[in-house]
Image: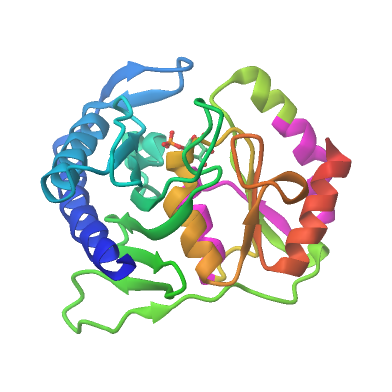
Amino acid sequence: MSAELLEMARRIALQAGALAAERRREGVSVAASKSSDVDIVTAADRETEALIRALIRLERPDDAFYGEETDAAAGSSGLVWVVDPIDGTVNYLYGSPAWAISIAVGELGQSDDADAEPTANWRALAGVVYAPATAELYAASAGGGAWVEQIGSPTHPAPQPLHVNTGAPLAQALIGTGFSYSADRRQAQAEVLLTLLPLVRDIRRVGSAALDLCAVAAGRLDGYFERHLNPWDHAAGALIAAEAGATVAGLNGAPATAELLIAAEPALFTALHGALLAAE
Ligand code: LIP
């Protein structure tokens, strides 16, 4: 099941990435703002999600859908697709390369909370993060490992397996993070950073949770944390990082949710979790 779902997600991500890249070349502008004046959506975000949603429905009409730019749709199959059509939207708007198509599919868990995030207690089955600007497609299936493909290379290199960095103490760890679109939340996040920054090697703020999680999987970051993420930001990247050896979770053993997501190899996860608790 996971292999077939992964192949489907990969195929759709490549089509969606080609569309988004073409729209980027044509020129991109803000279509609307959402939770704040700086939380924007472009017409390409909407068009790309519409394409992904239609392609999924064509092949698997009974699956649920949960995307950033359109209303959620329930399903009857027990599977849900969690999609960010363009993660790193602001980078996409400015023409920076750090943006990606993020597509994940999993088995919905049982929850009494109708408002619960679909990824809070789901079982992720397959995830793909495709970055057209760098032609890198990251992928993972449950229990099948994680890898990165170079798309379009004339030499057709084999996919490279992904493994997290291990052994870096917190003081030598390169940590990724990100910030909310809400000014009040950013103030609080900056105050946490004031405490954390002297405790680690350095901080990186890429602007795409999906690519931050793939960077942890690839060993280009030792760890990553962020508050206030949406499920579509991390659904695919979290599986890729976990299949590459990271612990991906929230506070005190809870699943990763909007409250907090931390991703790192187990020993660093514990150290980073403790430092974040102390910094709050
Ligand atoms: C983005 C996340 C990023 C976060 C940004 C934004 P978007 O998602 O991927 O980690 O720091 O504030 O939420 O809005 O580009 O889909």
Asked if 249 appears above or below 246 in the picture, the reply is above
Q: Position of residue 65 (x, y in %)?
A: 30, 38
Residue drawn at x 67%, y 68% as measured from the top left: 265
Secondary structure mostly seen in magenta is helix
Q: Position of residue 36 (x, y in %)?
A: 48, 16
Asked if 70 appears above or below 108 in the picture, the reply is above
Residue 212 lies in the magenta stretch: yes
- Image quarter where the C terminus lies is top right
Residue drawn at x 48%, y 55% as measured from the top left: 123
Residue 67 lies in the magenta stretch: no
Q: Nearer the viewer, residue 211 or 2?
A: 2
Q: Is residue 274 left or right of residue 228?
A: right
Q: Nearer the viewer, residue 276 or 121?
A: 121
**Would residue 208 be visible to someone looking at this image?**
no
Q: Position of residue 129 (x, y in %)?
A: 36, 56
Residue drawn at x 21%, y 60% as measured from the top left: 8
Which segment is the magenta one?
189-218
Q: Is residue 276 left or right of residue 120?
A: right
Q: Is residue 65 left or right of residue 190?
A: left
**Colour treatment of the image:** rainbow
User: Which residue reaches farthest right?
Assistant: 278
Q: Nearer the viewer, residue 117 or 203?
A: 117
